[in-house]
Image: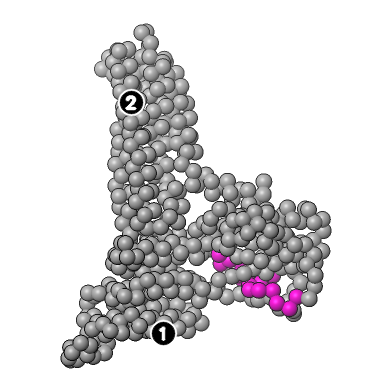
């Protein structure tokens, strides 16, 4: 099975809401068969025995209650999806689908339902699955406890700060997939292919539209080394490409074209949308979307944007302190290996701050919190990344000057504050406020 197929299957299973509950149902049926077999061999004391009518009533009640509770869980999930999509970002749903607690609750409920129904069919006048009835009651209690845990968890996850923390955690996980493990591997070259005067030996084009979700860089490098070829990725992870767009170019002698194309295509996954797993920029994109929606006129919640900036700043620090350097290909480089597009630190930084700065240009909270974040990044990131931070600080200065040109609070908008506004020792002014006849502050 190709690597791309395995990746797609793994993604489908992680995002599917029916596979784990199906396993729960099968486990419930199998468990009922085991318990019935055990009941036929074990004789319980009278206090643990049930009459046939009592067992039928109890199991029937359990089946009805669990079916109703399952429907309620599905209803709550649909409502949460609607609320999260409208309040945060539709891209956040990819993380919601994967939550193991949601799948675990559904599996527990479906499994209990299947277990109880299977036992109900086994109740006879001369045989009652006493152990099974007791176990079914215990499963109901466990299901209720899991449901309460599920309800509490997702109520808390509807907070904007919880969303930002969850996505920021995805940045740390996905940073390893964005070439971090291949930047210093021999024969991996970053950036565009310049100075190549040979003809392309094999041009592989995209079969259909979609976003590049993941690339098996190690497999491409290995193939290039084995065939003494130069493999050039024309698009990076996260890019959306159209049908028949160039995907991979091969320079050298790839051997049989059909075999080479099948192997190389099997190292690239194209799906309907981006995924956080191998694309840290997409995680940054989700956080920016949440902040921008909070800053929209319909919601007007700058405090949410400030909370997003808290975790966005930490994510940018993780990226800014990582070694994203690597060698680039030129005419003097070896004619074998892998050439891939890559995101620079400047790309991540611009993605993280540009839109929030523009949409929050009239909010003192956002301007002050962004300045505090940028001033902190200017010290925290690698030395070679600091000039880009200074450029963003200069852009922030220009945004404040434009957005607060006629405001009495222009001086306050130009102060860094980790809380946005109200932080300790942050009431001083950056320059005298003389607007509208207000005397300068001392």
Residue 253 vs residue 8: left or right?
A: right
Query: Which residues make up the magenta segment?
Result: 178-196
Residue 158, position as x, y percentages in the image: 32, 53
Mark nearer the viewer, 1 or 2: 1
Q: Residue 353 got which mark? A: none
Would you call the spot at circle 2 few (<14 residues within 10 Å), some (14-19), or many (20 or more)?
few
Residue 335 in sight from this viewpoint: yes
Residue 421, position as x, y percentages in the image: 25, 74
17 to 35, vertically: above or below: below
Residue 38 in sight from this viewpoint: no
| Residue 402 sits inside the magenta stretch | no
Residue 289, position as x, y percentages in the image: 41, 63
134 to 280, vertically: above or below: above
Would you call the spot at circle 1 few (<14 residues within 10 Å), some (14-19), or many (20 or more)?
few
| Residue 193 sits inside the magenta stretch | yes
Residue at the spot 69% in from the left edge and 74% down from the top edge: 193
379 or 307: nearer the viewer: 307
36 or 408: nearer the viewer: 408
Lower sequence index among marks 1 and 2: 2
Quadrant for residue 358, please give it.
bottom left
Residue at the spot 46% in from the left edge and 52% down from the top edge: 94
Q: Residue 394 got which mark? A: 1
Residue 251, position as x, y percentages in the image: 77, 67
In three-dimensional space, the C-alpha distance between marks 1 and 2, rounded to whole angstroms, equals 64 Å
Residue 167 vs residue 177: left or right?
A: left
Quadrant for residue 149, please give it.
top left
- Return the residue at label 2: 64
Quadrant for residue 37, please give it.
top left
């Amino acid at each position: 099975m190709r690597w791309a197929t395995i990746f797609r299957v793994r993604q489908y299973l992680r995002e599917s809401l029916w596979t784990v509950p199906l396993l729960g149902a099968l486990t419930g049926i199998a468990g009922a068969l085991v318990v019935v077999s055990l009941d036929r061999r074990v004789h319980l004391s009278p206090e643990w025995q049930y009459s046939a009518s009592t067992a039928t009533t109890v199991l029937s009640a359990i089946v009805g209650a669990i079916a109703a509770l399952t429907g309620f869980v599905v209803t709550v999930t649909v409502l949460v999806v609607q609320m999260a999509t409208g309040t945060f970002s539709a891209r956040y749903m990819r993380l919601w689908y994967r939550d193991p607690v949601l799948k675990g609750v559904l599996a527990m409920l479906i499994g209990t339902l299947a277990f109880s129904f299977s036992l109900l069919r086994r109740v006879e006048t001369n045989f009652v699955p006493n152990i099974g009835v007791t176990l079914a009651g215990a499963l109901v209690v466990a299901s209720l406890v899991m449901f309460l845990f599920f309800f509490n968890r997702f109520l808390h996850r509807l907070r904007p700060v919880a969303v930002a923390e969850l996505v920021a955690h995805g940045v740390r996980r996905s940073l390893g997939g964005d070439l971090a493990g291949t930047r210093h591997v021999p024969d991996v070259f970053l950036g565009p292919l310049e100075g190549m005067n040979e003809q392309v030996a094999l041009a592989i084009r995209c079969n259909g539209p979609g976003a590049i979700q993941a690339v098996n860089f190690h497999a491409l490098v290995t193939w290039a080394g084995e065939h003494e070829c130069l493999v050039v990725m024309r698009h990076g992870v996260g890019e959306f490409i159209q049908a028949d767009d160039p995907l991979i170019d091969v320079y050298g002698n790839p051997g049989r074209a059909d075999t080479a194309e099948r192997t190389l295509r099997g190292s690239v996954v194209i799906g309907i949308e981006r995924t956080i797993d191998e694309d840290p920029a997409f995680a940054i994109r989700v956080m920016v979307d949440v902040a921008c929606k909070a800053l929209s006129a319909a919601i007007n919640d700058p405090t949410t944007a400030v909370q997003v900036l808290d975790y966005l700043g930490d994510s940018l620090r993780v990226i800014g302190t990582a070694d994203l350097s690597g060698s680039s290909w030129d005419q003097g480089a070896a004619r074998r290996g892998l050439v891939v597009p890559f995101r620079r630190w400047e790309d991540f930084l611009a993605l993280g701050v540009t839109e929030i700065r523009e949409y929050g240009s009239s909010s003192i909270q956002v301007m002050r919190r962004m300045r505090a974040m940028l001033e902190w990044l200017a010290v925290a990131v690698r030395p070679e990344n600091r000039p880009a931070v200074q450029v963003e600080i200069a852009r922030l200065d220009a945004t404040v000057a434009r957005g607060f040109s006629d405001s009495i609070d222009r001086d306050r908008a130009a102060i860094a504050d980790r809380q946005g506004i109200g932080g300790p020792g942050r009431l001083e002014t950056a320059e005298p406020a003389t607007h509208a006849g207000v005397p300068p502050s001392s």
